[in-house]
Image (spheres, grey):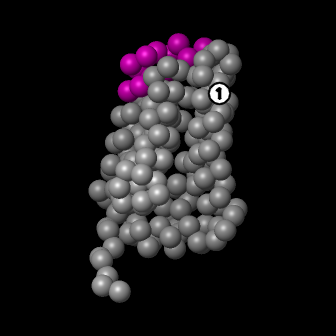
């Protein structure tokens, strides 16, 4: 589980890092989110997404509060699949396969737990949070719930143009 946690953790952390420190930084990410239709303004969502990605990435790498970190990844991937990756299944058509794989791996990590080499195991949290169905539900319910709520409350698809 260490390898799966670190792979997903590093990938999602780097997405958050990119939003804050690379390219257009938060301002560029905010502008991009506004173009996707995130309301009331993209800046709020840029900070929320970056913070979630950075935090979930660190927590997954450490194996700390693992199903909650997995929920963060699932939530981010749910929003991304609907707002930015609606083209088709395959990534080369701007599809949702990439965010599906990340979200699915996060759900599996939530279900199977962080493994022996984790802070959850070292502190005894694994027995409370990461027991099969409980870990999966802790990852899926808030992850999907908050992702869907974000879409319903804050996403207004841009109108198509005839350019």
- Where in the figure is residue 146, as x and y percent of width and height? 38, 46
Queried whether the magenta region covers residue 135, the answer comes back as: yes
Q: Quadrant of residue 87?
A: bottom left
From the top left corner, tell me how far across and down residue 71 is, in percent.
46, 37
| 147 shown above or below 140 | below
Which one is in front, 115 or 122? 115
Categorize mark 1 by other alpha carbons within 10 Å: few (<14), some (14-19), many (20+): few
Relative side of 52 to 159, left or right: right
Residue plotted at (65% across, 50% down): 14
**Residue at (41% x, 25% y) in the render:** 136
State the predominant SS element of the stretch in magenta: helix
Instruction: Look at mark 1 in the image and give the residue it sits on.
Output: 3
Rendering coords of residue 113 (x, y %):
53, 21
Q: Residues in magenta?
A: 124-137
The number of callouts visible is 1
Q: Which residue sits at x=59%, y=38%?
A: 8
State the residue lying farthest toward the bottom: 163
- Front one among 125 and 91: 91
150 left or right of 7? left
Q: Residue at x 45, y 22 (%)?
A: 111
Residue 34 is one of the magenta-drawn residues: no
Q: Is residue 147 visible?
A: yes
48 left or right of 55 in image: left
Q: Nearer the viewer, residue 4 or 147?
A: 4
Would you say residue 55 is visible in this rendering?
no
Query: Which quadrant holds the C terminus?
Result: bottom left
Q: Residue 63 at x, y = what percent?
A: 63, 27
For label 1, the SS is helix
**Placement of the N terminus among the 4 image quadrants:** top right
């Amino acid at each position: 589980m260490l390898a799966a946690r670190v792979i997903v953790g590093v990938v999602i952390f780097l997405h958050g890092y990119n939003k804050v420190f690379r390219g257009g930084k938060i301002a560029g990410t905010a502008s991009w989110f506004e173009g996707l239709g995130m309301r009331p303004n993209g800046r709020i969502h840029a900070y929320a997404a970056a913070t979630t990605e950075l935090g979930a990435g660190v927590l997954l790498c450490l194996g700390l509060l693992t199903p909650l970190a997995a929920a963060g990844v699932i939530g981010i991937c749910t929003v991304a699949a609907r707002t930015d990756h609606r083209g088709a299944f395959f990534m080369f058509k701007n599809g949702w396969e990439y965010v599906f794989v990340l979200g699915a791996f996060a759900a599996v990590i939530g279900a199977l737990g962080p493994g022996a080499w984790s802070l959850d195991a070292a502190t005894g949290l694994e027995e409370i949070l990461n027991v099969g169905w409980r870990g999966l539900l802790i990852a899926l319910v808030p992850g999907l719930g908050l992702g869907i709520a974000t879409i319903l409350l804050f996403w207004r698809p841009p109108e198509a143009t005839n350019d």
